[in-house]
Amino acid sequence: MTFGCRVNQADSLAIEREFLARGLEAVPPDRADIVVVNTCSVTATADQGARQTIRRVVRSNPMAQVIVTGCYATRSESDVARLPNVVHVIPNSRKDHLSHVINLTTADHSAEGDGPCGRSLAPGIAGRTAFTLRVQTGCDERCSYCIIPSTRGTGRSRPLQRVVHDVDGVIAAGYKEIVITGVHLGSYGRDLPGHPSLVELMQRLVDRSEDVLFRVSSLEPMDCTPELVGLFVSSARIAPHFHLPLQHGSDAMLRAMRRPYTVAYYSDLVHRMVTVMPAASLGSDVIVGFPGESDSHFAESLAVLRELPLSHLHVFPYSDRPGTEASALASKVDGSVIRERARAVRDIGTHLASQFRRAQLGTTRRALVVDDGWSAVTDNYIKVRLEQRAERNSWVNVTLS
């Protein structure tokens, strides 16, 4: 059971693969002997969601042994350990070999060379069609609101050759779409010998197969170099779908958040990307109610969001994270005001999504068939209903209407 970001989704895939390779069987939580909960802690709501889920699982399955990992487990180990039926709390630092940490005694059927998925995680398992692959974790930035450097540690990249090897394994298992993700993905390679860049990694990956689409996960605006954008434009193997967190439309708030760019820089970046990739889907994160956010700061942010060529927004009501710089700031925004501001930004997000979809009407896009074969997701991340059922995990061309 997974909460939070794509990095957590990738981690859960690795855990699931490890368990299946050791002979365990995937079953619903109410029938499981072992339930793994991979938590998020980006907000207080995320913490609460994990607690509620664990209690709900135990109510439906009182004999379940619950293993908790992820950012909430790392940040508040003692609190998590007190939850019902929790037998192990595994921090992120030990998550990669979770079954060994808990001394899982089932027979090991894993095989060398299977890659990060192997035959046990073929497309369609647990409802997934695309494969999410983590190539980096940790972060060296110090945004004032963010607890992730404390829960994930400093930036660490997987060696380039190992990533290529893993991708070959994913392709061999039958996946046609691979999502490349990391906590601070744009920093990939800075900690490795020779400092290979994300551009170098992606160039190596797009040369692997003509039938595989790579989707790039969230990228910080300052990491979207002209060289990287040029690769996005030139390669048909990279999906025209990007997530570029803005966080706020006021420079004063960006400075308070310790974000290393300005609104003007961000606006220029997304306009340049849309100019060279007119069909690209560009999403963003926005925080509302950051300490000190005045009515004028918020109005400034709304005005910026209305004008940016974005396709969707993820809205985060500000939540104090103990241990962060922002948690000690004065001038906290009232909760009712935060909720109202979040609604206003979500309304803009709904409008932007509708506007983007309308702009794509009449265009024909390549799409991957998902779910029950009646749906597909285009390369620029629009989900469509098919007129005829197609084989799941196959490519189709769809005309948006």
Image: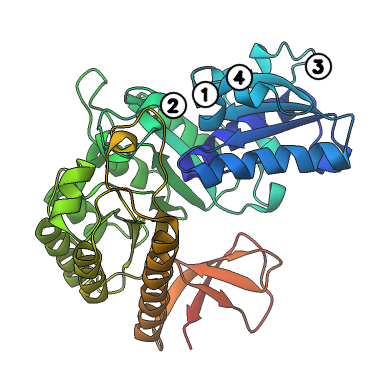
Residue 216 in percent (x, y) is at 37, 50
Q: Are marks 2 and 3 in contact (CB under 8 Å)?
A: no
Colour option used: rainbow
Contact? badges 2 and 4 (CB < 8 Å): no
x then y, percent, for residue 346: 42, 69
Labels 1 & 4 near each other (Cβ < 8 A): no
Which sits earlier in the primary sequence, circle 2 or circle 3?
3
How far, Cα to Cα, is label 2 from label 3?
30 Å
- Dot 2 and dot 1 residues touching (CB under 8 Å): yes
Indicate the amino acid at tag 4: Ser
Q: Position of residue 254 (x, y in %)?
A: 19, 50
- Residue type at tag 2: Thr
Element type at mark 4: helix
Instruction: From the viewer's side, name the closer residue of 1 and 113.
Output: 1
In the picture shown, does residue 108 fall above or below 162? Answer: above
Q: Secondary structure at mark 3?
A: loop
Image position of 343 with respect to 108: above or below: below
> Nearer the viewer's eye, disc 3 or disc 1?
1
Residue that label 1 marks: 74
- Which kind of residue does numbered mark 1 sit on? Thr
Q: Nearer the viewer, mark 2 or mark 3?
A: 2
- Near mark 3 (Cα within 10 A), the count class, few <14, some 14-19 or many ≥20, is few
* Residue matched to label 3: 106
Q: Which mark is residue 78?
A: 4
The residue shown at (81%, 16%) is 106
Q: Amino acid at mark 3?
A: Thr
x then y, percent, for residue 177: 50, 53
Task: Find numbered disc 1 in the image and state the secondary structure of the residue it sits on.
Answer: helix
Question: Which residue matches tag 2?
Answer: 151
